[in-house]
Image: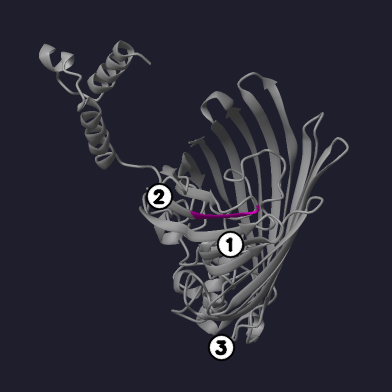
Amino acid sequence: MNKWKFSAAAAAVLLAGGLSLTPAQAADLGGDCCADLEERVAELEATTVRKCNRKVSLKISGWISQHLMWWDDGDLSDTYILDQGSTLSSHTTFSGSAKIDPNWSAGFQLQLEWFTSQSTAVDQATAVAGAGGDPLTLFWWLKSDQLGKISLGKVSQASDNAALLPDVSGSNLITANWVIFDGLGFFVRPTGGPGGFAGLETAIWGQFAFCDQIGAGIAADCNGVPRQAIRYDSPTYGGFSMSSSWGPDDFWDVAARYRGTLGDYNVAIEGAFSQVDGLQLLTGASVDSDYFQIGGSIKHMPTGLFIYGAYGVEDNDTVFAANFAGETTLPDGSHFYLKGGVQKKWWQLGNTTIWGEYAEHEDMAQAGFTTASPGDGICTGLGTVAGTTIAAACGGGPLTITDSTFTRWGLGIQQDIDAAAMALYIKYRHHEIDVDFANAGGAVVQGFEDIDMVMGGGIIHF
């Protein structure tokens, strides 16, 4: 480069850096010009926020999700604006990685979750609840292409979402899966009682779909919240892989999965077993519980038709004073979920997914109210409801649950908008419970009102 070309390039760099030059300065490109340029570059570097340390990459991603929910509990109705619920609400994820050599790499993840009003926290009398934010995951990892990956910190353990993730339907897992987020915290309403708030029970819907292992009424994915753990993930061989994790107070789990294409069909299946013999993650209560879950789906790619199913069973050995029919431990609750439908790109905007879903949750009532007496447990509310059979039974002596079934079904449609990395949806869900009670005098009959919900909203990814 000759002197005049270099002079023009240097002047352009200095002007772009924001320096104000007089004509004399612009013409003065003597021997110290490069020293001035290096000084300015050093100053800019010192005042710039760097995205990384030039060794570890940094990626920011996530999603924003909000929806409207109209509900009707058989007497009261209203419309709320809500988040999806814990683990599915709006996220911001900071992640990064670095190559150590051709076969080894290392990285990290920090995932923050944000709430304005959680769908799991609201009820008939509370339209806005659960605002805030939490670190959902925070861990580092070390990976070998041949040996697998180790992660340490607050991590999604091996059995977390094991039966959810094999859903290849294309419907967003945030909008339709087997975990109960919608209406979870709403109070149940006994039939035959007064209307309004006075006719509500103190028990909530989630207490009839209680996972003892985690300590929450989410009905499924009973070890489904990230926790402090060390996790191992194997490499994938022919579509097969496995994972295992362990964490303090005390839990361990193992999962195996397959993902692949068989002719015109996209196929996925995953199963997991987890054991907690220590403390519930969310409540800190003592628990002894095993949980097995399995999920799988198949999709015919030319037509877009799909079916997905999941099953889980919880073996509860946690000792309580008395529970179902006077037993000292909870029964082994079980649940299944089915979803079927079609996904097609009928127009340029993106895929359209239409689905129907059905689920049942057997004997998953929470221990805290499965034995009832006047002024305690389920009788706290029901005992004040004039004219109901169960009120008289509570007044006459302790009441126990001999059987419970939580049933739900729904329909939905989702429209993807590819150009905006967005999905819009509307869905309907119907929940009902059937509970059998008994006391010393025999069976006690009491029904509960169903609850209906219509939800419409959007998810945009970044």
Crowdedness of circle 2 by 10 Å Cα count: few (<14), some, many (20+)?
many
Q: Is residue 421 left or right of residue 256?
A: left
Q: Quadrant of residue 364?
A: bottom right
From the image, tell me which residue sits under label 3: 321
Q: Quadrant of residue 255?
A: bottom right
Quarter of the figure with the N terminus: top left
Specify the segment rendered in magenta: 103-108
* Mark seen at residue 129: none
Of marks 1 and 3, which one's residue comes earlier in the chain? 1
Of marks 2 and 1, which one's residue comes earlier in the chain? 2
Q: Which residue is at a point 45% across and 48% down the rendered structure image?
A: 94
From the image, tell me which residue sits under label 1: 224
User: Toward the viewer: 276 or 40?
Assistant: 40
Residue 236 appears in view? yes
Q: Viewer-nearest of labels 1 and 3?
A: 1
| Amino acid found under the numbered disc labelled 2 | Trp
> How far from the left and from the top, in percent, is residue 188?
52, 60
Tell me the CA gap for discs 2 and 1.
18 Å
| Amino acid found under the numbered disc labelled 1 | Gly
Relative to 350, does residue 292 appear above or below in the rendering?
below
Q: Is residue 141 magenta?
A: no
